[in-house]
Image (tube, helix red, strand yellow):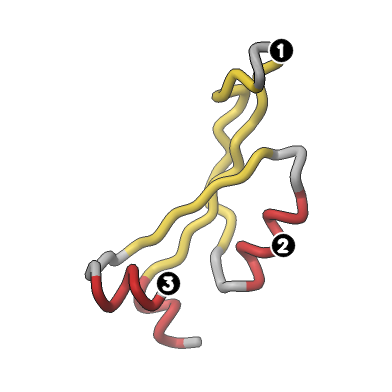
Amino acid sequence: MRYGFEVLRLHPIHSGHFSHNPASAQILQKIGMVYEFCRRQSIDFNGVDYVDIVDYGILKNDWQAN
């Protein structure tokens, strides 16, 4: 995230994970990202089923505070 905020000069950084993968949510939370929203059935997963994408984000100000 340092590269994103300091070199690329991003203000928000966003990431997402499949809703059926809670371990990814734990990693995003551990690095300071917070839940923002869920995009329901937005990805065709292997042509079999549609899955939800859960989005997390962090602002530069929040990252600097930690």
Residue at the (57%, 24%) spot, across then down: 43
Q: Secondary structure at mark 2?
A: helix
Q: Secondary structure at mark 3?
A: loop
Residue at the (39%, 68%) spot, across then down: 59
Residue at the (40%, 85%) spot, across then down: 64
Relative placement, left or right, of 44 versus 19 is: left
Compared to residue 58, the image places residue 14 above or below, namely: above
Compared to residue 3, the image places residue 49 above or below, namely: above
Q: Amino acid at mark 3?
A: Met
Foreground residue among 17 and 66 = 17
Relative placement, left or right, of 61 versus 51 is: left
Give the CA separation, mark 2 to mark 3.
Answer: 16 Å
Q: Earlier in the sequence, mark 1 or mark 2?
A: 2
The x and y percentages for residue 51 are 66, 26
The x and y percentages for residue 60 are 35, 74
The x and y percentages for residue 44 are 60, 18
Q: Amino acid at mark 1?
A: Val
Q: Amino acid at mark 2?
A: Gln
Mark in the foreground, 1 or 2: 1
- Residue 62 lies in quadrant: bottom left
What crowding class fits label 1: few (fewer than 14 Cα within 10 Å), some (14-19), or many (20 or more)? few
Q: Earlier in the sequence, mark 3 or mark 1?
A: 3
On the image, numbered disc 1 is attached to which residue? 48
- Residue 1 lies in quadrant: bottom left
Q: Any mark on residue 26, and which?
A: 2
Give the CA separation, mark 1 to mark 2.
Answer: 26 Å
On the image, numbered disc 3 is attached to which residue? 1
